[in-house]
Image (tube, rainbow, N blue to C red):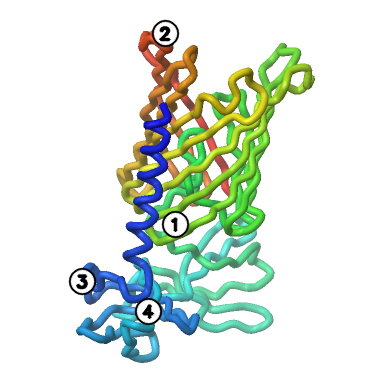
Amino acid sequence: MKKIYLLLINITIFLAMFVQLNAQDGRINFSVYETGKYYKVLMTNGMEVTGKLIKVDDLTIDIKTELKTLRIKKEEIIKISKFYVFIKSNSLDTNLKTIELKDGSEFIGQIRSQDSLSLKFETQSGTIIDIKRDQIENIEDQRYDFLIGDDPNKTRLFLAPTGKSLKAGTGYFSVNELLFPMIAYGITDFFSVAGGMTIIPGATDQLFYLNGKARVLHLEEFDLSAGILYTNITSGDENGLTILYANSTYGTRDAALTLTAGLSVSGTENSGQYPIFIIGGELKLSNSAKLLSENWILTSPESGKIFSLGVRFYGKKVAGDFGLMYFVDEDGESISGWPFVPWVGLSYNF
């Protein structure tokens, strides 16, 4: 087991080094960036430039912004990342807003002009509408990740966390298997907390858990996080279980791999001897669906393994999971019944 544990650690370190070598100043592989595509460029002076990549030569790149074309020296660039936008009339639209009216209507577009009483709003179809301010419930910046079909629950698989983190002030409420509600909230862009408790009818005790997770490394296609999980029963008669874990996620919106290693530090007789490993994967099927797999390897002599495969359907704020889980004991024999255990989850993001 120690060999497996060291192998997973080495894989995580290798992925982190690989991504960082491709993201650091002076080692960016500019040949992978396509002219005519939109990118966000972070420079050594802290300035960010967003626009279309026009030209790449040996020493510089040309970026066409909404106002002008800039020539930037390669040595001044720290990072380049893809930038997803809607293109309209060959111009870069960077000011998309979502307006929600009190009657429940919602529009995505740009504010063209406004005064104290009303505003002119151009929708993505090009329609200009006048909206009175007393009709408006909310105005917010439109997130580009949702425009291209991003999963709002990318911080977790079915249940286990990924290396990604919630943004500050955002979170979700979810119910799994109808009996396990939980809530999570981003305190900052790199630290989040979560908690939940079972609601099994007739049970004298319920199981609850508390979790804190911190993202320690964030690159364009790689995230590394560490956390602590505590779980116990409501009566407190039993010793609680505390697990320290680290997990990493490598990939894009289209496909990603998550590796997690955890170790119990209290609550079990053999604490620290038998680590837990989780291997998960995501594969995007469309702008509103993806395949999920979450597989647990419990290394203690009397434990087994859990394998799963399913699908997640998602919109801007709501996501639903359906999967099939297969349990095997320490001898590799199935304990799932016939033939799988279904997994159902529903989440609302705020």
Is residue 85 in view?
no
**Disc 2 designates what residue?**
337
Nearest to the eye among marks 3 and 2: give it: 3
Q: Earlier in the sequence, mark 3 or mark 4?
A: 3
Where is residue 105? Give x, y as percent.
Answer: 55, 58
Label 2 sits on a secondary structure element that is loop
Residue highlighted by disc 1 = 146
At a point 61% along the width and 23% down the height, the residue shown is: 179
**How far is the residue under mark 1 from the one under mark 4?**
27 Å
Amino acid type for the residue under numbered disc 1:
Phe
Is disc 1 surrounded by few (<14), some (14 to 19) or many (20+) residues within 10 Å? some
Amino acid at circle 2 = Gly
**Mark nearer the viewer, 1 or 2:** 2
Q: Residue 77 got which mark?
A: 4
Q: CA distance from mark 3 to mark 4?
A: 15 Å
Q: Residues within 10 Å of mark 3 (few under 14, many from 20)?
A: few
Determine whether, in the image, residue 38 is placed left or right of residue 268: left
Q: Residue at x 47, y 34 (%)?
A: 158
Give me the residue at 34% from left, 87% from top.
72
Query: Image quadrant of residue 90?
Result: bottom left
Q: Nearer the viewer, mark 1 or mark 3?
A: 3
Q: Which residue is denoted by mark 3 in the rendering?
A: 31
Q: Dot 2 surroundings within 10 Å: few (below 14), some, or many (20 or more)? A: few
